[in-house]
Each structure stands twice: as C-alpha cells, then as structure tokens.
Amino acid sequence: MIINLEKIPDCKALLRLEVPADDAKAERNQIVKLFAKQAKIPGFRPGKTPGNVIEKRFKAEIESEFEERIVREAMQKAQEENVDIIRISEIREQSHNNDGTFTATIELITAPEFELPEYKNLEVQVPKIEVTDDQLKESLDQIRERFAEYNDVENRSVKMDDFVVINYKGSIEGKPVGDVLPLAPATLAQNTGFWLKMADDSFLPGFSPPLVDAQLNDTKSLSVTIPEDYQAEELRGQTIDYEVEIVSIKEQVLPDLNDDFADKINPGKSLEEIKSALREQMEEQRKGYRKEMITNQILSKINSDLDFELPKEIVMRETQSRVNDIFSSNTERGVSENELVEHQEEIIESAGQQAHSSVKTSFILEQIAEKEEVDVSQEEILERVSQIAARQKTSVKQLTKQLKKKNGFGRIYNGIRIEKTLDLLRDSAVIKEVEAEDLETK
C-alpha cells in the first residue's frame, strides 16, 4: 500500500492511498474465502461454493469488507507518520479501478500541534486556610439567623437591618424584564412575598437604601443598575426599574450565643464543641476552594501563553452540546422557546467561547499527560467503576455492561488521567498565601 499524508488547515489532513493490483487481488481473495466458509448457498455444500459464485452473490458485502480493511490498514500506517489522528472526518473517494488497483482519499481530523510552555513551578496566589475568630463569629451568626425570631413592626418606618416582606415587579424601558432579558433569573423580574434583608449587598446592590423610611403598605419606585461583576455577563450594566410594595416590616431577634443554643444545633454538644467543629468544617471548605483556585490559575497561565489552531468540528460539537444544555435548563425554569430563539445568537456566541476554552484546555492537559507519562492502572479504573456503581445504586456487573456498550471505560480512563495530570500541576505549583482582601485586589 502506498500512502501520502498531506496536512491541511483546521487541524485536518488528507490521506491518499493506493493499493497495487496484486495486493488488492490477494486481499479480495482472502475475503472471498472467508465468505465461502460461512455462506449457505443452495446446490453447494458448505465451504465448497466456487469463488466466482461467492463474488457474484456477495459483491456489495465483499467490497464493503475490502474497503474497511484497507482503510484500517491505511490508518495504522498514517499513525506511524507522527500525526496524532483523532478520527476520520469523511471518506471522500473510493475507487475500484479497471487496472485492478484501489485508490481512496480520506479526510482526517488531527490533534493540534504546539509546544508546551513551562507548566511546572508556576506561582499562584491563594487565601490563607486558617479561620479567624471574626470569620468564625460571622458563620455562627449565620447559624443564629436560622433560629431567629421575626417580630412584626407596626409603629415605625423601614430602617436598615430590618427584614421587609415585599412584592415587586421590574421593567426595562417600560417592558417586562422577561421580554427584554429572557435569560435573566425569574426572581430578577418579579416576586411576591419576598423576604428582603435591608442591607447594601442584599438582593441587588442599591435595591435596599431607597426603601428606608417607607411605611407599611407603601409603594416605592426605584432603579437598579446591574453591577459589572454580576455573574451573568449578559445582564451587566442593565438598568431595571422596580415598583416595590411593602407588605410587612419585621425585626430580627437572634438567640443568645451560649450552650443552650449549641444544644439546639446539635443536642448534647457545648458551644465550644460547636465552635471547634465549625472551624474545622470551614477550613475543609477553604481547602476545596483553594484547590479550585490553584487549578484555575495554573490553567489560565498556561492558556494565556499558548495560541494554536483547534479542530473546528470538535469545537462545534462542544458548542452545540453547551447550547443544548442552556436551552434545556432555561426551558425547565419556564423560559419560552420563542424567547430563547430571539437570543440564540448571544447564546451561541457565549457557548462557543466556553467550548473553545474547554477544548483548548483538554488538548493542553492531554499533551502534558503524554509528556509526563501519566498512566492509569486497571485497579484505578475498577475502583472508579465501583464508586460510580455505589452512587448510582447499581451493581458493578450491571454498570460494566452499560460502560462496554457506550465506550464508557475510555471516558473513565481519560477522566482519571486528566485528574492525575491536574494533581501533578498543583503539586508542582509555588503557593503564595495572601490575605483574602489582598487577593481580591490583584
């Protein structure tokens, strides 16, 4: 077999192959013999049917088997050309020529080629793990709030730190929020019986102060501009006008912080025991948060140092998957299909950016795994299968059957390999601890 591999843009390659007449004939004869052994044709004993009869009877099947074998062999040879082939995009041409030769052109999707930057000993900044007494007190106060009593206030107006029960409806330039921003959370548009704590950072910045001095049953008009650091990018900078009705005013009364309160939280425990357990829990949460921060900073540094072409088909497939997820999640929370279609360009653009970043990161981590020879043992895969089976409340045997049908073991292998690669990167990072307030200003 003669093959020629030509790299083309968009992480693709054209594989042109030619099988000489003698080789093509020998391969075809092997397939005919295989069919002859298995074929049951009236008038002939099993295995004794002449080759010409087999070729005539199973012409299409023989050609299909021949083409599959040749393509497999060509792919094996192409892998030896130091090209990382992901999969076949399409088989453009296949020709059984009059001179007995066979030729084909196959379009392949290939992994991007790039040189890894330095990925070890990267400096990252994280907040300190230890919990201060003030932070512990703040968490205890949050627990106290769950046991608080709320007394109705009727003889004065609203003030900061009160709780008010309100009905509200938002609009943008006279139109309902849902019509202008269909992806906005439902609570941003309107609500009834909503409990609002009168604080600067409650609900939306700037929402509470205009309600100060309002009386019971008053209706207040106010405007709020969504801050630039709001989680949903498409909502940032939007100004929403609200009509707010004061349904009731309540004063919060917190329980005393003592052993009696501790016993309510966890019977038989003292306040000091509750504090110790809470501090330990907060430190564990911070460890998880730090781990995520370290990962994100490392990947951000590596990504910023690299710019390379990605396979468009893979990015498009990932984009479509994310678009489907967005449509599905928004449909579940009541956003109409028409509203989603109106904003589909924004949805697709956002999903595309996320997909590009995700696919790029995947290729980077795979190359690091290759360079560091990160491997996954059979024991690690079996342990992960057992964990998944336990979570799904099924047997390992049943789950194994399902995984075999869907190439699930390959996904598990890749998942564990990426996890181990991230562990390697985190272990090599240079950790610099800073105060939380300093971290926010970096």
Image (tube, grey):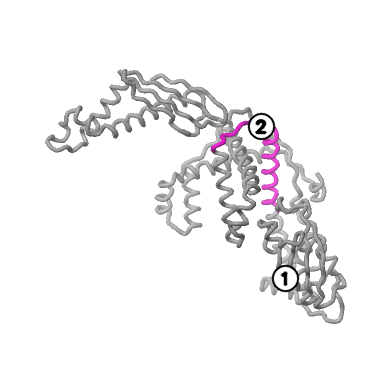
Query: 271 left or right of 73?
Result: right
Q: Is residue 361 magenta?
A: no
Q: Nearer the viewer, residue 62 or 83?
A: 62
Q: Nearer the viewer, residue 125 or 16?
A: 16
Disc 1 crowd, CA 10 A, few/some/many (<14, 14-19, 20+)? some
Q: Residue furthest front?
A: 174
Residue located 46% across and 25% down the image: 15
Q: Is residue 308 magenta?
A: yes
Labelled disc at residue 194: 1
Residue 430, given in percent of the width and then of the height, sits at: 72, 38
Residue located 51% across and 24% down the image: 82
- Looking at the image, residue 398 lies above or below residue 188: above
Query: 337 left or right of 33?
Result: right
Disc 2 crowd, CA 10 A, few/some/many (<14, 14-19, 20+)? few
- Looking at the image, residue 274 lies above or below residue 389: below
Question: Which three-letter amino acid code belongs to the residue tagged 1?
Answer: Phe
**Whole-number angstrom distance, CA of label 1 to CA of label 2:** 48 Å
Q: Residue furthest left?
A: 43
Q: Nearer the viewer, residue 360 or 258?
A: 360
Q: Earlier in the sequence, mark 1 or mark 2?
A: 1
Residue 111, given in percent of the width and then of the height, sits at: 55, 31
